Amino acid sequence: MTIRVLICDDSAVMRGLLTQIIDSDPRLEVVGVAADPLVARDLIKSLDPDVLTLDVEMPRMGGIEFLERLMRLRPMPVVMISSFTERGSEATLRALELGAVDFLAKPGSSLQIGEQAREIREKIIAAFHARKRLAMHMPARPEASAGGVRGSALPERVLREKVVLIGASTGGTEAIKEVLSRLPEACPPLMLVQHMPEMFTASFARRMDSLCALRVKEAEHGERLMAGTAYIAPGHSHLKLGRLGTVMQCELSATPPVNRHRPSVDVLFASAAPLLGANALGVLLTGMGKDGAQGLLSLRKRGAWTLAQDQESSVVWGMPREAAAIGAACEIASLGDISARIMVRLARTTSLSG
């Protein structure tokens, strides 16, 4: 089956480059191009494409406004095109909240787009196969408790000794929001890797901080882990768990990508396994590829409790599927249940081994 793609971008050069990249894959076919959302609207009606690529800033109607209308009237898989600017990253995060499956960087030259060709094709194919995310229909912020467990229920020892480790990719921004927004402020430190460029992680951390009882921030090299805080890996570096004496801390590294990613989930999980053992909780959420599966297995082998998101609630069941296939997950759970599972596990004062 050929996946039929409609391109919406106000740049004729970009439309041509994207057409060339997409049509080079026999699984894909560009069935139309549009210079603005109003033209795209008519083409969607007449061509019935499988996937839409959508620019953020365009004439006559902005990409975000068009996406909001599209998802209300004619939901379909959408991959956003965005510039790596603060304004562009904020708009892209809003697009993901509205239902866009994923996003691409807007290349500045034909050379750049050539380097990104495989990623462009992979994200369009993943968008076509993506499942409707459940998080879109869930409350954005918890009430006084998470999963029926109040923050005060956790012993001080748990807040001091445990660390929650989370990894995600495609669909992960909304999945992470669903998990973090349902956790109480009185929670052990969390360390997170979401595959995302540098400017986007800064915007994402600010957005999560505004929605959650937890403090959410970009991780900084050498900073001490504190209870009630979630540390998101910056898009330019791997995030590792380090230890200085008895103090656990964040460590950033600009070493080469792992599984084609920097930051990599495997790097975070592998760094934490020997330092935490059964004091770790590892969670692998929706995402394309296999990053995090081996790292989750290393955590489980060290006695950690590990969990992978299930297929039905994942936007793309790639990373969690790989983890399940190699026996890395103690449990498989729906996105809506993950926060409660974390809190129940943390509430136990005995070993967290699976």
Image: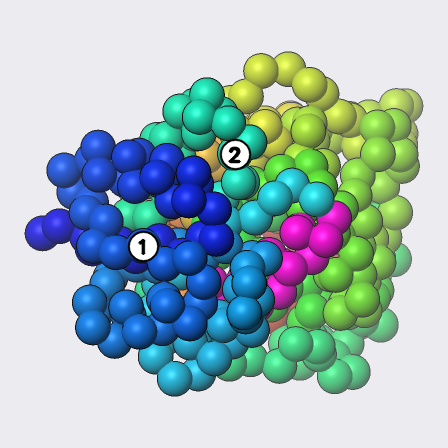
| Quarter holding residue 293 | top left
Residue type, label 2 = Pro
Q: Which residue is mark 1?
A: 33
* Outermost top residue: 255
Q: Which tag is nearer the camera, tag 2 or tag 1?
A: 1
Please report the residue visible at 44 percent of the width from the left and 83 percent of the height from the top: 72
Label 2 SS = loop
Judge from the rendering whether residue 35 lies leftward or rightward of residue 194; answer left or right.
left
- Residue lying furthest left in this view? 1
Magenta-highlighted residues: 86-103
Mark 2, residues whose alpha carbon is within 10 Å: few (<14), some, or many (≥20)?
A: some
Above or below 254: residue 241: below
How packed mark 1 is, by other alpha carbons closer than 10 Å (few <14, some 14-19, many 20 or more), is many
- Residue 319 appears in the figure: no
Q: Amino acid at mark 1?
A: Val
Residue at (19, 47) in percent of width and height: 29
In percent of width and height, residue 338 lies at: 54, 65
State the residue in front, 6 or 50. Answer: 6
